[in-house]
Image (cartoon, helix red, strand yellow):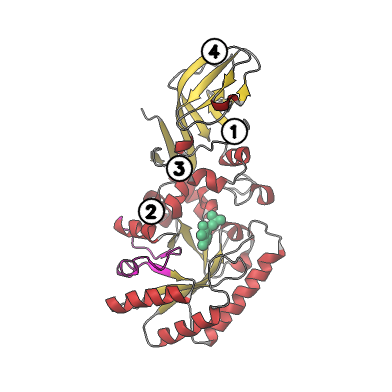
Amino acid sequence: MARAEAIIDLGALEYNIKRLLSNTKADALAVVKADAYGHGLVPVAERALKAGAKWLGTALLEEAVALRDAGITAPTIAWLTPVSDDFESALKKKIDLAIPSLDHLDAVIKAGKSLGISPRVHLEVDTGMSRGGALKEWSALISRAGELSKSGGLEVVGIWSHFARADEPNHSFNEEQLHNFRARVSEAREVGISPKILHLSNSAAALTNESSHFDLVRLGIAMYGLSPDVKSMGGSESLNLKPVMKLRARLHIVKDVPAGSQVGYGGTATTKTDTKLAVVAMGYADGVPRNANSSAGVLVGNKKAPIIGRVSMDQFVVEIGNDSIAHAGDWAYLIGSEGGDGYTADAWAEACGTINYEIVTRIGPRVPRVFTN
Ligand SMILES: *Cc1c(COP(=O)(O)O)cnc(C)c1O
C-alpha cells in the first residue's frame, strides 16, 4: 500500500555488531544519533543492546531523552549539548554528558547542585581534529574536574576523543592522535582523575586499529553495514558487513516516449532513442539527492534503470527501456533489492559527490521505516 518505505533489517544490524565485537576486547557503544543514521532510533537502540552493545551514544540531548522516554535504561552519552541545554533533565534521566569545555562543566555542575546530584561526565579532549573537545583549556578543565571529583560534586566516568582520519588507516595522523590521547589521559590521572572508561575509536578505527580501542568502541556507520570509506577500506562486502537499510518506492507512471524527448526540469537529459520511462514516487523532499546523476537509479523487475534528468521534490524519472515489463504500482528499489544486485548507498553517494553516511541519514520523515528480522 505504502508509497515508499525504508526496510530496516534488524537481523543484519545484529550480525554487524557481533562481527565488530568479535574484532575487539572492548565493549561497544552503539551510535544512534540522527534517528540511528536514518534507520529508526528506538528499534535500532533496542536491537543493538540485544546484540551485545553495552552503551548508547547520541549527539543531541533530545535524542538521549527519547531513548529514556522509550524505557531504555542502558548507559547513554550525549555529546553535542550546547550550554543552553536542559542539563537538569539530563541528570534526572541518568544521561551521561560529554564535557568539552569549562563552560560546559560550569553549566552541568550548576544543574547538579540544584538537584543534589553528582553529574556523570566524559571529559572530551581535542587530540588534533580541532572540532570537539578541550585543547589549550585541557589543563584547566582537568584541574577543576579533579577538585570537583574529590569533593564528590562530579563523577568523571570517562575520557574520550575522536579521530579525524581513521578512515585512512595508514595515515600517520592516527598515531599522532593516539599518542596525544595517551598523554592527555596521563595528565588527568596526575591530578587525581581516575576514569573508568577511555574511548577514542569510531567504526573505522574499530575495524582497523586495535591499539586505539581502549575500553569502548563507538560504532556508527559499520553497525549499519556500510563502509567508513569505500576507496581506502573497501565496501560492505569486503568488510563482511551487511547493509541494514533497503529503500523502495512505487512506480507512479510507466510510459513510452519518442527519441529526442527532454526529461524533467531544465531539460537536462534527452532520450537517445524511442524508449520507456517510469516515474518513481520519491524525491528530494524524501532525501533523494537532487543532483544525483545517472550512475544511480532503481532496480525494477530485477533490472537496473538509471535516473534520467533532474530529481524533483516528490518524484524522479528513470529509463526502464522498451523491453521492460514494469507496471505502474510496482516497487522500485533505490537501495538494495529483494535478491538481485541493486544500487547501494555507496552508488548513490558516488552519483552525487557525497558519502554513504549522508545518503542514509537524509532519508526524511515522509518515508516510513519498516522493521524486519
Ligand atoms: C558519529 C560519531 C561516531 C561514529 O562514527 P562512525 O564513523 O559512523 O563510526 C563516533 N563518535 C562520535 C563522537 C561521533 O560523533
- Residue 155 placement, left or right of 162: left
Q: Point out the tag, 1 or 4, that comes first from the N-terminus.
A: 4
What amino acid type should be assigned to the residue bearing mark 2? Glu
Q: Nearer the viewer, residue 124 or 343?
A: 124
What amino acid type should be assigned to the residue bearing mark 1? Ala
What amino acid type should be assigned to the residue bearing mark 4? Asp
Span of residues in magenta:
70-97
Rendered position, 34 above or below 141 = above
Rendered position, 267 above or below 346 = above
Tell me the distance, in whole angstroms, between the alpha carbons under discs 3 and 2.
13 Å
Count neighbours of disc 3 (C-alpha within 10 A) and say few if under 14, some if 14 to 19, many if 20 or more.
many
Q: Which residue is mark 2?
A: 46
Callout 3–callout 4 Cβ contact below 8 Å = no
Q: Which residue is mark 3?
A: 9
Tell me the distance, in whole angstroms, between the alpha carbons under discs 1 and 4.
21 Å
Q: Which residue is mark 4?
A: 256
Task: Give the numbered dot on residue 284.
Answer: none
Res 149 → quadrant: bottom left
